[in-house]
Image (tube, grey):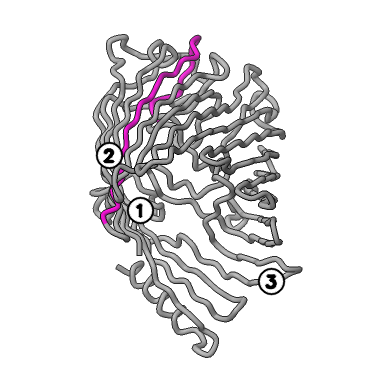
């Protein structure tokens, strides 16, 4: 209860700041609820990612849970160039609450994690317009979405929509037909704890967008992730470019990126980042009342067959290609996709997608929600998904869907029991309210 009172007091204090300067206040929020049911998924994942045993090390079972995220936000304009935002959120699994008599829960020991009966500070920042050389400054905790969120997003796609926010400073400059974004975020901090080793993590970058060609956007970026000083140290540099737009009824998305860098002072010797990524999609929308759209997609995240190298790392990606594989961090994989969607009425939309997954380097590990898979085959499987959206009202949306992953040889050959290889099925229903 005390945490809820603290949140309410903070909102009240913000609304009471200098009435002379306060121009406008808007209160908003969101309630998002999704019921998830997984059949024939594996109950355990590999404890040792480098284990020579290629078994999935678990049994298939039914997993069902309902997740909910609730947000209350306040946006305030104090003058033409000064504004602020504060947003409190709570993410929980229905029934997964904490109290002083309930030990051994999956929450953090101090109940400070994102799950459970807690309210956390999702965003809190001050924005200064035209603060330095024409740049707008955003200072504080903030969600960030760059480009299509291929590498930097707020991680709210599909299930487990906790939302990611970054702590730091962002600077934005808007020209006539281009924008420049600079940022310096603290991804992890340990200096406050004198007993900890210095393994702070910083995430910095520059992102430039050009919109001088009508109906097209061209982006370029450089991203740096640095972690650690005393012992293990990571330095990762990502350079990439993106183009997206439309040609008549055609739409396209193309992004390429490469990574370099190293990891020093780790057991077994230093490692090098050597990875490349491609994400491409081409769609066509027909001229009709239902506006059916068909698309083809291709994505590749390189792995490696060298013991002293690391394949492409997804950073904070919000692209999820599967309901089973990944959660935005799947790498060492090549993906072929195709699909069709249509607005069958003013409020109802339908979609169908088919995706095929293959390992980029056989024998190397790729993470997925089933297990870490290693083996001599490269076929992870094919997934088919069907989806329906219903815009119940201007504020309420409903979504239902189902997907099945048909195992490929790379997963089937890794099973503990040859008979325990049923293809997993996922079904969900979601309702959301935004105000």
Q: Which residue is mark 2?
A: 428
Separation of residues labelled 3 and 2 (CA atoms): 45 Å
Viewer-nearest of labels 1 and 2?
2
Q: Is residue 382 magenta?
A: yes
Asked which quadrant contains residue 170, the reply is: bottom right
How would you rate the neighbour count of disc 1 (Cα within 10 Å): few for under 14, some for 14-19, many for 20 or more?
Answer: many
Q: Residue 324: image x %, image y %? A: 38, 30
| Label 2 residue SS | strand
Q: Is residue 126 part of the magenta span, yes or no? A: no
Q: Is residue 77 visible?
A: yes
Specify which label sits upstream in the sequence, 3 or 1: 1
| Identity of the residue drawn at 49% across and 29% down | 296
Q: Say few, some or many: other residues with alpha carbon within 10 Å of mark 2 (under 14 / 14 to 19 / 20 or more).
A: many
Residue placed under numbered mark 1 in the picture = 91
**Image position, residue 20 (x, y; %):** 53, 90
Q: Which residues are magenta?
A: 369-392
- Of mark 3 and mark 2, the one earlier in the sequence is 3
The residue where tag 3 is placed is 130
- Residue 70, quarter of the rendered image: bottom left
Provide the secondary structure element on which disc 3 rests. Answer: strand
What is the distance, in whole Å, between disc 3 and disc 1 at their CAs? 35 Å
């Amino acid at each position: 209860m005390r945490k809820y009172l603290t949140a309410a007091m903070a909102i009240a204090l913000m609304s009471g700041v200098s009435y002379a300067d306060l121009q406008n206040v808007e209160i908003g929020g969101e309630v998002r609820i999704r019921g998830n049911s997984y059949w024939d998924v594996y109950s355990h994942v590999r404890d040792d990612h480098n284990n020579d045993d290629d078994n999935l090390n678990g049994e298939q079972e039914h997993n069902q849970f309902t997740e909910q995220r609730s947000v209350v936000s306040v946006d305030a304009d104090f003058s033409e160039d000064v504004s602020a935002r504060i947003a409190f959120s709570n993410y929980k699994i229905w029934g997964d609450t904490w109290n002083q008599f309930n030990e051994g829960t999956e929450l953090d020991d101090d109940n400070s994690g994102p799950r459970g009966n807690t309210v956390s500070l999702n965003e809190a920042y001050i924005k200064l317009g035209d603060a330095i050389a024409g740049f707008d400054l955003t200072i504080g905790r903030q969600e960030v979405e760059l480009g299509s969120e291929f590498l930097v997003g707020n991680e709210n796609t599909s299930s487990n929509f906790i939302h990611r926010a970054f702590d730091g400073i962002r600077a934005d400059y808007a020209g006539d037909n281009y924008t420049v974004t600079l940022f310096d975020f603290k991804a992890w901090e340990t200096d406050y704890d004198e007993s900890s080793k210095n393994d702070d993590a910083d995430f910095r970058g520059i992102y430039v967008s050009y919109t001088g060609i009508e109906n097209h956007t061209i982006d370029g970026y450089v991203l740096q992730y640095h972690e650690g000083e005393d012992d293990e140290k990571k330095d990762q540099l990502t350079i990439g470019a993106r183009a997206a737009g439309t040609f008549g009824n055609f739409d396209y998305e193309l992004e390429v990126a490469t990574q370099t860098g190293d990891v020093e002072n780790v057991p077994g010797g230093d490692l090098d980042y050597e990875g490349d990524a491609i994400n491409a999609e081409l769609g066509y929308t027909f001229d009709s009342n239902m506006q059916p759209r068909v698309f083809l997609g291709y994505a590749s995240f390189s792995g490696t067959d060298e013991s002293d190298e690391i394949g492409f790392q997804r950073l904070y990606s919000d692209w999820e290609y599967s309901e089973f594989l990944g959660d935005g961090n799947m790498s060492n994989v090549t993906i072929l996709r195709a699909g069709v969607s249509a607005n069958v009425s003013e409020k109802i939309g339908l979609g169908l997608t088919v995706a095929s997954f293959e390992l980029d380097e056989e024998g190397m590990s790729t993470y997925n929600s089933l297990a870490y898979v290693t083996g001599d085959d490269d076929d992870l499987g094919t997934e088919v998904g069907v989806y329906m959206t219903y815009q119940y009202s201007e504020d309420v949306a409903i979504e239902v869907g189902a997907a099945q992953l048909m195992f490929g040889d790379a997963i089937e050959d890794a099973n503990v029991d040859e008979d325990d290889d049923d293809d997993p099925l996922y079904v969900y229903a979601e309702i959301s309210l935004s105000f």
